[in-house]
Image (spheres, rainbow, N blue to C red):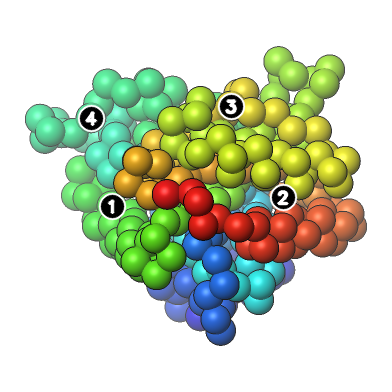
Amino acid sequence: MDLPQDFPPAVPLMAEPPPYLLTRPVQRTAPLVFASPHSGRYYPPDFVAAARLDPVALRKSEDGFVDELVAAAPELGAPLLAATFPRVFCDVNREPWELDPGMFDGPLPAWVNTASPRVGAGLGTIARVVATGEAVYRHKLSFAEAEDRIRRYWQPYHAALAALIAETRDQFGMCLLIDCHSMPTHPAQAANPPDVVLGDAHGTACAPRATRLAEELLTSLGYRVRRNDPYAGGYVTRHYGRPREGVHALQVEIARPLYMDEARIERLPRMAELQADLTRVIAGLLSADWSGLR
């Protein structure tokens, strides 16, 4: 089930879509998998009702339209996995049980990770705040609500991603996961902001050759690229990126001002140009010789 491109912000559809959309190529041509974990635009009605924020504010954490920016991947020979639910509802770029105990109306199980830096920042698996720091909920949640989201959304998404990676490695002997995100303007870099940040967990999640090729393809098109600063890669990059086992993961953060109005969560006219450039980058990655990368 595909989502209408222009339905109103944070307004639920009549029928809930599946937790992810997987678009496969007619024929696999290279050992790459593309993923967009934070571009989901289906906001469940119960969640919207429980939130204290208006619809646009709820979308501040959303990697708006990133799935569209890399939509050419299947046409060029690589699968694209995209979550349909938003990051503020359930964040698949976190461990499954990173939860803030202050958000809940009772004690959490002892095995829940309540002490991670992400939880401390209010950005655990179930976020306490949106990216701008505003609290999401009117009232505290029950652990049952968090458990339901993780089991119905987080787990199916990761099951699909893990299966894609295993399938790719079986077919090609290795897999390169390109995990696609967008980034707001970072205050510390306002004077010289990068257009793209490539995160490979400081060289531990992806072979340097793959990171270097992505950087070269982007810079050849005029984009300012930075590595691992300020985003070195989240849970997906660090969990799946295991070069010694033939799985490489590269997080790609695209500056939102390049293609969208951050305040209104709307596409800008120049989005088409960026989409065309990223299609060239995808084509370059897919046409590369990955045979020696194991």
First in sequence: mark 4 vs mark 1: 4
Closer mark to the observer between disc 2 and disc 3: 3
Q: Cα distance, mark 2 to mark 3?
A: 26 Å
Q: Cα distance, mark 4 to mark 1?
A: 14 Å
| Callout 2: SS | loop
Q: Using the rendered image of the protein, determine whether residue 109 is visible from the camera's viewpoint.
A: yes
Closer mark to the observer between disc 2 and disc 1: 1
First in sequence: mark 4 vs mark 3: 4
Amino acid type indicated by mark 3: Asn
Q: Is residue 84 left or right of residue 155?
A: right
Task: Write down the residue under mark 1.
Answer: 150
| Callout 1: SS | helix
Q: What residue is shown at x 77% (from left), y 36% (from top)?
A: 195
Q: Nearer the viewer, residue 128 or 218?
A: 218
Amino acid type indicated by mark 4: Asn
Closer mark to the observer between disc 4 and disc 2: 4
Q: Is residue 164 left or right of residue 142?
A: right
Q: Using the rendered image of the protein, determine whether residue 61 is visible from the camera's viewpoint.
A: no
Amino acid type indicated by mark 2: Ile
- Find residue 113 and name its label: 4
First in sequence: mark 3 vs mark 1: 1
- Find residue 265 and name its label: 2
As drawn, the residue found furthest toward the front would be 292
Q: Percent x, y for residue 254?
A: 69, 42
Task: Write down the residue under mark 3.
Answer: 228
Q: What residue is shown at x 49% (from left), y 39% (from top)?
A: 206
